Image (tube, grey):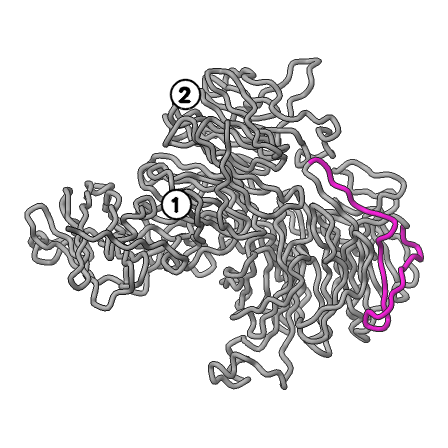
Amino acid sequence: MHRMAQKRSVVDTDIKRLNWRSVGPGTMGGRVSEVVFAPGESKVFYVGLASGGLFRTKNHGTTMESLFDKEETTSVGSIAVCDLPANFDHPAEAKAGKSKKELKELGRNQMIWLGTGEGNGRNSSSWGNGVYRSTDAGATWQHMGLADSHDIPAIVVDPRNPDVCYVAALGHLWGANEERGLYKTTDGGKTWAKVLAVKDHGCCDVRLDPRNPDVVFAAMYYRRRKAHKFDSGSTEGGLFRSQDGGKSWKKIKGGLPAHTGRIGIDLYAENPDIMYAVIESGQGGTNSIRDDRSKSGGLFRSEDGGNTWTRMSVRAPRAFYFCKVRIHPKNDQKIYMLGWEVEVSEDGGRTFRGGFGDKMHVDMHSIAFDPNDPDHIVVGNDGGIYQTFDGGAKWQFLNQIAIGQFYNIALDMSEPYRIAGGLQDNGSWVGPSSTLVETEKYEDGTPQTGITNSDWKYVCWGDGFHVAFDPEDPDVIYAEWQGGNLTKANLKTGRRWHLQPQQREGGAAYRFNWNAPFFVSPHNPSVLYLGGNMVFRLSDRGETWERISGDLTTNDVDKITTEGSAAETFCTVTSLVESPLTEGLLWAGTDDGRVHVCVDGEWKDVTPKGNDWYVSRIDASAHGAGRATMSLDGHRDDQYDPRILQTTDFGKTWNDITGDLPKHRSVKVVREDPKNPNVIYCGTENGVFVTLNGGKAWLRLNGKNLPHCPVDDIQIHPREHDVVLGTHGRSIWILDDARFLSESTEAVLGEALHVFTPRNCRPIERLFLQGLWADDEFRGTNPPKFAPITYWLKEAATEEVSVTVTDEKGREIASMSGTGFAGYNRVVWDAQPKEIYRLPDAGQEPWWTYFVAPGTYKIQVKCGKLKSETSLEVLPVLNC
């Protein structure tokens, strides 16, 4: 008689050693919110990303080091860097026994104040959770409070004392909250005082007079975004000044408009009495979104410390998104205004010229000057990081880090498979999950990286969103740009077709979401479905189309009007999917919370009772026609907790399976495992999670190296069972062969030792290239060579773990030592036999790879008296 195995649940520590691999691309960047140089340094600067964390270079951008991957947010709004004073008690010094001189040599002698949450307020902006501080240049971090401030676009430190800091807190973008305004700490962030407050207003900028840091300038700003509109500006906001360190304030009015929105300010370093402010103003009316002129706002100059102002220019490009001005460090007449491009004035703002870095991506958010050489300038925009060493004549694009902001991804069935995806303001691209070239080696000498920027190909323009492969023609990819502009692209010929349905003359225009869902039917590759306010069926690969539903939204006439940008188009379908089991069985969810199912051509409203949250994703199950899992995202209604529902009866009832998912992280995507209905993945604003028991308990799946960034899409490859993530800030990541999660049933987890079924092993003869690469190039990681073998230990091993491979004749072909951690462990077999089973020397070069013959091999894992076995199928070498 066998005793029942004692139950064991997976805990976070069981999966913390899982290794994700970044495949890029780094070809295009992502939105940069802030760039700052370290004090007195030309080679060292910091880059804050809107949703991808914080990076630093110590060598003019040749290499970039990520510093902020494991905190509870990767949205950076502002950075302040200062040298530690000589008397500062450095914690790292005590821990490591390093002298202050040694710490300086290591670059650990700087304090960083970091404000999280970008302040640019677009429809896809992420948010932060307050202020962080590092006293060792980013090696370690402390959370210093203001967690509900959400967006911190500016932070300044008193040059006399790094424990004195001012924080511009904008507050929630999507609703009202108390923690907004200008905050000050005098004790290094232990306590905070709100020193400037205007009801419902946040602080969007703050500056200190370097001659007297008790003189503080702060800009107060009202903004409120909804899914269907954006409000900006008031008469209560504006520019304020304190002359006593924030104890008292006076609103500055001389020459400035009474109605102000976002304001950006700068003081001239050589003479801080000279100031500039770029001001958004609705006074006198507003212009169209593409008209950069303001009727009352624009660029203003003061020459008396802010007492009086002169309007220099009517220009204020798309102020809610830009609104920054910088003065040349040595010339108060040379002004840089950030907008669609960097606009430069040589006459104090009277006239501006474009063309400053005309090869750069558009949408400028930050500009920084080398403290030792003002011709060395670094710019951050929606496309990434750029620098010039000659004042803007020539530019360098620093695209060696993968910081793309993906919305959606798709996988094909090539071998190796390809990944396509759409990105914020960077179009749609396609690239490989692995390559036949290796460019670097692991520490143990085995080849590693090989996916380069040149492996990724451009598919479509604009803001990229959903993508789909034609399963019968590898040269054809469907992509779209904002507002449902569906395109079919032939990569071989370069031809593109616009496929978006258009209303007939006289009819009401169709509405399409900023991120309109579409897909190729899994049952018929010539059929596509596209969601607008209705659902459209496109036949003959998009040549013809028809409406197959009525308006599936609330059709609220007070909300369907646009603000002039496709970003605010409302009452639209946001998620659309067809059952993989039943052709024509469709699910549709909308931005106003409606849910419909189409069975046998009939649509039925199955909206969960009381729901009005944005439907971020519906996933139709492979385990039952009436089964679907749905994620709801309430952040556009200023509700940030996760919500996941599931139905097994075509939407008649919905069960909440949110379980113990952490609070304050909206769910952006949900994906059911195709092999095990109890295994469900979800991507949130702050990382990826998995449940192995149908939602009763959720586990963070970031493993040891996946940043805690927004995960907007999850795909599971049907053949390889890789979990592929489209992140909004750090491009694409892959967890290879996640079958072990599918097979983690209650019975398996109760076993003391269990080896999981590995995927089929396809050896690949990779070419190792040396001498063609440099450190300033992106190189993504190829999958392990070649067979990942994953096993479970219920408890940490007290004896050695061994893994052996035997062939069909029972001969031991390979043996390896394994790790003995409690939880999941993985080793990789290189599909090569022991020396005694290799072919006799036939004159091959010594680096020639000998793979085992195709066939079935037995895998055995042993730990003391424990033993577990499975089989592995080795396929013929791919490129032979």
| Of the pair 542 and 134, the residue shown nearer to us | 134
Q: Which quadrant of the view contains residue 373?
A: bottom right
Residue 420, x across and y down, in percent: 45, 38
Image point (28%, 53%), residue name: 750
Residue 389, x across and y down, in percent: 62, 62
Image point (21%, 67%), residue name: 799
Report helix, strand or loop for mark 2: loop
Any part of residue 176 in sight: yes
* Left or right of 89, for residue 758: left
Q: Amino acid at mark 2?
A: Glu
Task: Give neighbour class at mark 2: few <14, some 14-19, many 20+ (Cα, 10 Å).
Answer: some
Residue 693 numbered mark, or none? 1
Residue at far front of view: 1
Q: Amino acid at mark 1?
A: Asn
Magenta segment range?
228-257
Image depth: mark 1 or mark 2 in front: 1
* Left or right of 507, for residue 491: left
Name the residue beneath numbered marker 2.
Answer: 583
Mark 1 or mark 2: which comes first in sequence? 2
Residue 257, x across and y down, in percent: 90, 50
